[in-house]
Amino acid sequence: MKTAAIIGSLAILLGLAACTDIRETEPDRTATEQLLISTAADNAVEQFDFTSLAGQAVFLRRDYFESYDSGYVLALTRRKLGRDGVRIVDAPEDAAFIVELRSGALSLNNELFYIGVGGFTIPVPLSDSIEVPRATLYGDYDRTGIAKFGALVFTADGTLHRDLETVYGLSWMDHNSILGIGWNEQNILPDSITDNPRPE
C-alpha cells in the first residue's frame, strides 16, 4: 500500500513537471545588433584627432548629442580624448575648451539576396494568408552597421576654435549559404573569439 502511494505521488509529480514551462526573458536587441552598432561607433570615434588639445582642460558637452547608444559613444569619445592627452574636466567653467559632439547616423542596414523559391505570403480571400517557406540554392544576408559623427571645438567664451573632420565607421556581419551550408564573415569579433564558445 505504501509502495503504491509513493509510486502514485511520483507519477503526479512527474506529470506536474511535464506541464511546467520555464520562461526566460530575453533583451529586445540581439547581441549581434549591439556588436554591429558598437563596432561601427568604435571605428568612427577612433578617427577623431584631439592631439591639438593635448594638455588642455576640456569639457565634453553631452546635451547636443542625440543618437542610438549615445552613452556608449560619449564614453568612447572621453576615452579618445584621454588617449590624445587631453585633461577632461566635469564642468564647463573649469575648461579652456569645450568639445561638442554630433551624430549623423548610427544604425543598421540589412540586405538579403537569394536564389531559390518561397519566402513570401499568399493572400487567401476570407481566410488567413499562407506563408510559403523559403528554400534557397544560394543565400547572402548582409548586415551593416554605419556610424557618422562630427565634433566642434569651442573656446571657453563660446568662440568656434575648430570644426573636426566628419568621421565614418562601418561594421558588418555577412551570412552566406549554398545548399543549406552556411558561413559568416564579420568584423565585430576578434578572430580569437567565437560566438559559440562551448567545449566540444
Image: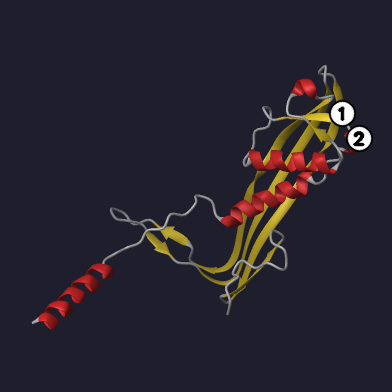
Identify the amino acid type marked 1: Arg
Where does the image place residue 105, in percent across and percent down from the top left? 68, 40
Q: Looking at this view, is 85 or 102 the one in front? A: 85
User: Of tags 1 and 2, which is closer to the observer?
Assistant: 2
Q: Position of residue 21 (x, y in %)?
A: 32, 63
Toward the top, the furthest residue is 157
Contact, mark 1 vs mark 2 (Cβ under 8 Å): yes
Looking at this view, is 46 or 104 the one in front? 46
For the point 26% across and 66% down, the residue is 19
Tell me, for residue 79, which label it has, or none: none
Task: Please tell me in which quadrant of the rendered image residue 101 appears.
Answer: top right
Q: Determine the residue located farthest toward the left in the rendered image.
A: 1
- The percent position of residue 193, horizontal first and vertical second, equals 68, 67
Three-letter residue code for mark 2? Ser
Q: Tag 1, which secondary structure? A: strand
The answer to whether residue 27 is left or right of residue 179 is left
Q: Which mark is residue 162?
A: 1
Q: Residue at x 67, y 27 (%)?
A: 63
- The residue lying at 73 percent from left, 67 percent from top is 191
User: Which residue is labeled 2 in the image?
Assistant: 52
Q: How is the image coloured?
A: secondary structure
Q: Position of residue 53 (x, y in %)?
A: 88, 33
Dot 2 crowding, Cα within 10 Å, few <14, some 14–19, many 20+? few
Q: Residues within 10 Å of mark 1 (few under 14, many from 20)?
A: few
Q: Quadrant of the C terminus?
A: bottom right
Question: For this rendering, which residue is in front, 194 or 87?
Answer: 87
Image quarter for residue 158?
Answer: top right
